[in-house]
Amino acid sequence: MMGRILVIGLDGATFEVIEPLISEGKLPTIERLLREGTRAVLESTAFPHSAPAWTSCMTGVNPGKHGVFGFGVRDDQNNYRFQLPNSTTVRAKTLPRLLSEYGKYSVLINEPISFPPYPINGTIISGMLTPQGARFTFPPEFQQELLKGVPNYVTEVSPFDFDLENTAGKGAYAAALFDTIQARTQAAQFLMEKETWDFFMVVFTELDRVQHHFWAEMDKSHLFHHQKDSSLNRVIPRTYEALDEAVRIITEARPSDAQVFVVSDHGAGPLEKIFYLNKFLEERGFLTLKTPILSGKQNPVKALIRKIPGTEAVYNRLVRLNRKRKQQSFKASDPRHYQQKIAQWVAEEMVDWDRTQAFTDHYGVRINRKGREPKGIVSPGKESQKILNDLREQLLGLRFPHNGKPVITDLREGSEVYHGPFAHLAPDLITFMDVGNPHPSYFTREVFRDSLVTTGAHKKDGIFIAWGPGIRQNHSLGRAYIVDVAPTATYTVGIPLTPEMDGRVLDIFDQGLDPLKLSDRRGTSMLSQEGEMTYTSEQESEIKDKLKSLGYLD
């Protein structure tokens, strides 16, 4: 089989919303693709976030092989800080890189971990981790051509540019996201007509954004639905409808011989309470802060930074800069904005590492182990295992205060979940929740807090739809996995899978699968990095603002 493949990514799409909308006649394109194609529930990575999930989708390997476990990458083994991932920190070959080795031409639009755009046989428009004002295309000169053809193209609409605590601000944010869907669709059309390609992928992240911020408006059973403005109840359904139209336009513009995959990196559901894992660890005696965050009206950030030389000046400067902003999610006097700004720096200083056994590192629990952590106190072996066992027992017994449901649905050790040359960078204990994930903040007075602004979060089950010539019709695979997408696309294009690919080729084809092709594995998925790019402090602050507003980072 030698073919072409169009992949349309709908970040956060879930059949739990799609199927009711189809029953209402609202999604005619997706309904047709399901009727004339093959579907599956697509299970995400263990930590169902865009960074590891889209990277696994693009490489066909688990995070233990590509090295991206979340939106935080360990800065240095000599400290406890994390930096943002980017395309140079991905340790496995993405589909465009792999296909380039065989002379295949690729187009990649808005895949989240694609900045800086890297050299391929093809074209890249980078995604959500692109700093404002940075060059975001490969080849570099294509950016001017793109903006001439699609003048209003932007890589990301930042929630921090809107007041999401009132109806007018949320309405303006939704309108900006709808405009972005249109611009993204126009960019895809522009490149579809301009290039002769073998692999074409465009990711729409706008659905994920509205599901984070408008779930309570849509969901009548949500704890805070009654507090929301009814005029915004249909923002999420309207986004699905807008994307249904985008899928129609793009699929109709493709060459008729190209097969189509519609995929999401994870699903979505209602978020009602935020669970602060570091506060839980503190209360249970696993973690100790130098300056405890106490209940009451005191500003915990100010109380802390006054004890750390040099940080109060930074705080005051942030206050002054914030007052110059026209729109903000938080008032200038509200410590939540500043705790987000400086948490990454201050966290290392506020934790008493000499008395801390365990902490959360954004996507699980990490033991403060001797010989591995800069100030480790826990011996490897029996002592570490005892702490893990104690944590397992206490976390699995934890219940949400408002409904009595389990907070943690499963716990697995990192070595059970990940494998590969970078598996040692994974957390020691992976926490699974029905919706969302534990929040990593140190700056909180409570283990649980109402989630009033971000009312939706990720679930593990996304979507997979295959459609086009040679695809089995009206067929269901049941369940597939995010790592299956790249091997299936590779098989479709007609090049060998690599030995490292963890996923399988999905049985979606009328003619079945060729055993000889499946067994013919060549080359390698592993990528030798000659040098990593790092963001400037200003760029990192800007991008972290976006991620924090979505609940991805502290």
Image (cartoon, rainbow, N blue to C red):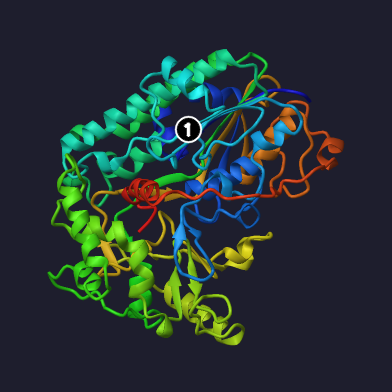
**Residue 339, percent from left and from top:** 26, 61
Q: Residue 338 in the image: x percent, y percent?
A: 24, 58
Relative image position of residue 222 (x, y in whole percent): 27, 49
Query: Residue at position x 22%, y 37% from top?
Result: 170
Residue 490 or 313: which is nearer the viewer? 313
Q: Is residue 265 above or below residue 292?
A: above
- Left or right of 124? Residue 276 is left
Which quarter of the rendering shows the N terminus? top right
Instruction: Identify the residue at horizontal 31%, vertical 48% (top origin).
Output: 549
Image quarter of the C terminus: bottom left
Amino acid beneath label 1: Phe
Residue hosting label 1: 136
Residue 225, relative to residue 405: is it above or below? above
Q: What residue is drawn where x is 38% and y is 29%?
A: 154
Which of the pair 317/396 is nearer the observer? 317
Which of the pair 75/404 is nearer the observer? 75
Q: Nearer the viewer, residue 341 or 184?
A: 341
Q: Secondary structure at mark 1?
A: loop
In the picture, measured across the screen, residue 414 lies left or right of residue 164, that is right
Of all residues, the one furthest to the right in this rendering is: 516
| Residue 225, image x, y percentages | 22, 46
- Up the image or down, 412 lies above or below 389; here it is above
